[in-house]
Amino acid sequence: MNLSDITLDREGLAAAIACEDAAFEAALREEAYRVKVATVGPEVYLRGLIEISNICAKNCLYCGIRRDIRCQRYELSEDEVLAAARVAAERRFGSVVIQGGERTDAAFIRKITRLLKAIKSIDTRDDPPLGITLSLGEQSREVYEEWFDAGAHRYLLRIESSNPDLYRKIHPAGHSYDRRLQALHDLKEIGYQAGTGAMIGMPFQTAEDMADDLLFYKKFDAPMVGMGPYNPHPETPLTLSGASFPSAERRFALGLKMIALLRLLMPDINIAAATALEVLDPRGREKGLLSGANVIMPNITPEEQMVKYNLYDRKTQLRDCPSSLDILSSQKIVIGYGRWGDSKHFHRRLSWIKSLSLTS
């Protein structure tokens, strides 16, 4: 297969995903990087990742912090979260991500609201106040509005699979595909930069499913996407079921390929080089950036708690430190220090909507 053979429809995307020719994959990644630089620039934007809690009310069949799994639970205090956010400010990351298991109890919701307001007041010297992304699962529209008003402006809620049948295979009863879709639309209508994403190379998934995921992002008009290769956790029902899935080498290649194809399909969005890539290759995120991604999330969770946020096998072996960013700089990857790095796609869409209202 040649680059000139790619068509960005379901059939063409599925063919590109299924193709395992190394020369084609290398050419695709190179072209995606060229398109990234031409449309959103050479910069890579940083999101300091704060994993606030591994307590979760959901019971997803693939997840290492699912409700019924036996693990040591934790929740960061407000002081710990703010200390991590100050680290992000000092290192000029520009933004933080607060990620955690899904909880809808009132105490947790109020805690997040307080933290959002406090993070916005952190002194960032000459830089703008820290940008804030949340990734805390499905919430009511009222909660999303409360957090938006308190200072969050981006929200990542992964669909995990855009195929309703596959979604049901990897989630137990009580997990609703339609509810997940409604939450995404709520976020978008409120005004968030509403991002989504899916696992790549998981059991039961076909090349057509992955093509449909890419087209789902396009149809939803997602301004940012965070997707990554499926990495099994040894104690989850999906792993214990014995269902087959691609090798680690193939899942890594698929992860880079999906980034590259998405960059061609949606040239001006933000695409994260997921931590899951680094589990499969020690230079995984760097290779993701060179395949068209433009966001990374250095982990600034306190180390004694970070090791408990074990979403998948070997996830807890990953560490971030200033030297990892120095490595990117040595590869001539430009880091956008002190900048939010908001999605150009989102702001272009916003400008278009405003222009329609002015002419109506």
Image (tube, rainbow, N blue to C red):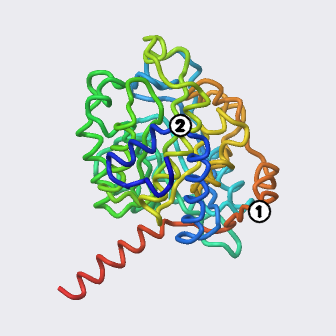
Q: Distance of mark 1 from mark 2, alpha carbons?
A: 29 Å
Depth check, front residue: 273 or 156: 273
Which numbered dot is residue 20? Answer: 2
Q: Answer with the quarter of the image where residue 145 lies.
A: bottom left
Give the image location of residue 163, x and y in percent: 29, 36
Q: Residue at x 65, y 32 (%)?
A: 280
Q: Quadrant of the C terminus?
A: bottom left
For label 2, the SS is loop
Query: In this orientation, does residue 134 appear?
Result: yes
Instruction: Name the residue type under label 2.
Output: Glu
Nearer the observer, disc 1 or disc 2? 2
Is 175 situated left or right of 311 in this image? Answer: left
Give the image location of residue 285, x and y in percent: 65, 46
Is 160 situated left or right of 317 in this image? Answer: left
Is 104 situated left or right of 35 in this image? Answer: left
For label 1, the SS is loop
Q: Are marks 1 and 2 in contact (CB under 8 Å)?
A: no
- In the picture shown, does residue 67 fall above or below 190? above
Which numbered dot is residue 332? Answer: 1
Give the image location of residue 302, x and y in percent: 70, 39
Number of callouts in the render?
2
Depth check, front residue: 138 or 315: 315
Q: Residue at x 63, y 52 (%)?
A: 48
